[in-house]
Image (spheres, rainbow, N blue to C red):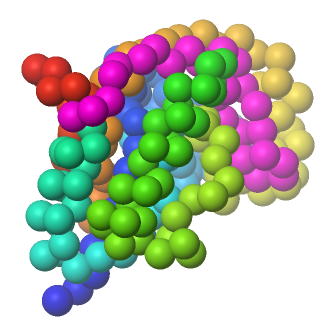
Amino acid sequence: MSKQLYLIALVPHEKLRDDISELKLEMKERFNASHALKAPAHITLQMPFRRDEEFEETLTAGLDSFTAGQQPFEIEINGFDAFPPRVLFLKIDNHSPVVELHSDLQPVLRENLGLSDKEIMDRFHPHLTIATRDLSKKMFNKAWPEFKERKFRASFTADRLHLLKHNGKNWDLYREFLFDNIES
């Protein structure tokens, strides 16, 4: 059985995903950076990890159980920031609830789902990537002065986790897990 690639994230509503996709397309067209287009806009809570497909049942049960105890919260996006020399992203203003959610998820991933310390993200800085990996240093140095001054404000309610699954080329929104049993 082949191993599948998964990722756990907070994903904004479709309109905001579309707006962020426009930014990613701009990065592709103007700065030759298209890698970020391989995934819908998201805040990574658990970096990609591989598991056998038969593990999905355990994974989804664990995430269902975890999200049943979570309360929805607002995420405020305000402007751009960077991890020089390759990554541009949208800034999250209110890190605290996202950091707390990430922290609460860690023991579930380790103890209930068996992820190893190597697989789990220890350093965590919530953000929404618009350019990564394939953004050259030269293009980063062209893009960053412009984006650092550019305005972008938005918000969304974090009321569910998403499990993304890699299809061999791109990331698909595979399953969602509602917080506090909210009806979708």
Front one among 151 and 54:
54
Seen in the image, is 131 located left or right of residue 157?
Answer: right
Name the residue: 46% across, 14% down: 74
> In this picture, is 57 found above or below 90?
below
Q: Is residue 23 left or right of residue 60?
A: right
Residue drawn at the location 16% of the way across and 21% of the way down: 182
Q: Is residue 4 visible?
A: yes
For the record, the magenta segment spans: 68-91
Which residue is at a point 21% across and 34% down the rendered structure image?
Answer: 68
Depth check, front residue: 57 or 34: 57
Q: Which x, y percent locates residue 6?
A: 34, 63
Q: Considering the whole magenta stretch, tell me its main secondary structure.
A: strand
> Can you say whether 139 is above or below 169 in the image?
above
Question: Residue 147 at x, y = what percent?
Answer: 77, 25
Q: How many marks?
A: 0
In front of the other: 5 or 57:
57
Judge whether residue 34 is colored magenta. no
The quadrant holding residue 52 is: bottom left
Question: In which quadrant is the C terminus drawn?
Answer: top left
Q: Is residue 23 above or below residue 66?
A: above
Q: Is residue 130 visible?
A: no
**Horizontal and vertical percent for residue 73?**
42, 17
Residue shown at the point (38%, 51%) measured from the top left: 8
Quadrant where the N terminus lies? bottom left
74 falls in the magenta region: yes
Residue at the bottom extreme of this rendering:
1
Residue 130 location in percent, x, y? 60, 38
